[in-house]
Image: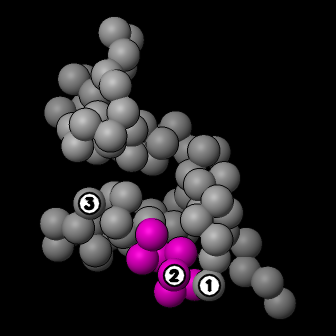
Amino acid sequence: MVAVMTPEKIHHSISSMISQGVPYIDALITFAEQNGLEIETVAAIIKRSSILKEKVRAEAVQMRMVKKDEDDLVDILD
């Protein structure tokens, strides 16, 4: 039987890493490796959750991995 992965299940699975200060991006990569998933598969699941998607984007903006847009929610989430 194949377990259905939802954004909520992924967040629950990585929450202990996040609570220990591991960045979302690193936690998602570790999750993918531990579960034998392609990172693209995890990304497709994350795209379904506006909350997780924005948290990853906010982290990427802080790490200067992507440019901040004028209408970003990053400032609102901080």
Counting other residues with Cα less than 10 Å from the Cα at mark 3, is it few (<14), some (14-19), or many (20 or more)?
some
Q: CA distance from mark 3 to mark 2?
A: 16 Å
Q: Which residue is mark 3?
A: 23
Counting other residues with Cα less than 10 Å from the Cα at mark 1, is it few (<14), some (14-19), or many (20 or more)?
few
* Picture disc at residue 63: none
Query: Which portion, as a residue range, is magenta?
Result: 29-35
Residue 46 x, y percent position in the rendering: 56, 52
Quarter of the picture containing the C terminus is: top left
63 left or right of 48?
Answer: left
Q: Which residue is mark 1?
A: 36
The mark that comes first in sequence, 3 or 2, is: 3
The reply to whether residue 6 is visible in this rendering is no
The amino acid type found where label 3 is placed reads: Pro
Q: Is residue 28 above or below residue 75?
A: below
The mark that comes first in sequence, 3 or 1, is: 3
Q: Which residue is mark 2?
A: 33
* Quarter occupied by residue 49: top right
How is the rendered protein coloured?
Answer: one colour
Residue located farthest toward the top when viewing the structure as drawn: 70
Check if mark 2's residue and mark 1's residue have beta carbons within 8 Å.
Answer: yes
Counting other residues with Cα less than 10 Å from the Cα at mark 2, is it few (<14), some (14-19), or many (20 or more)?
few
Q: Is residue 33 magenta?
A: yes
Quarter of the picture containing the N terminus is: bottom right
At mark 1, the secondary structure is loop
Q: Is residue 73 magenta?
A: no
| Residue found 36% across the figure and 16% down from its top | 69
Q: Is residue 71 above or below residue 21?
A: above
Q: Is residue 40 above or below residue 73?
A: below
Residue 50 x, y percent position in the rendering: 52, 37
The amino acid type found where label 2 is placed reads: Glu
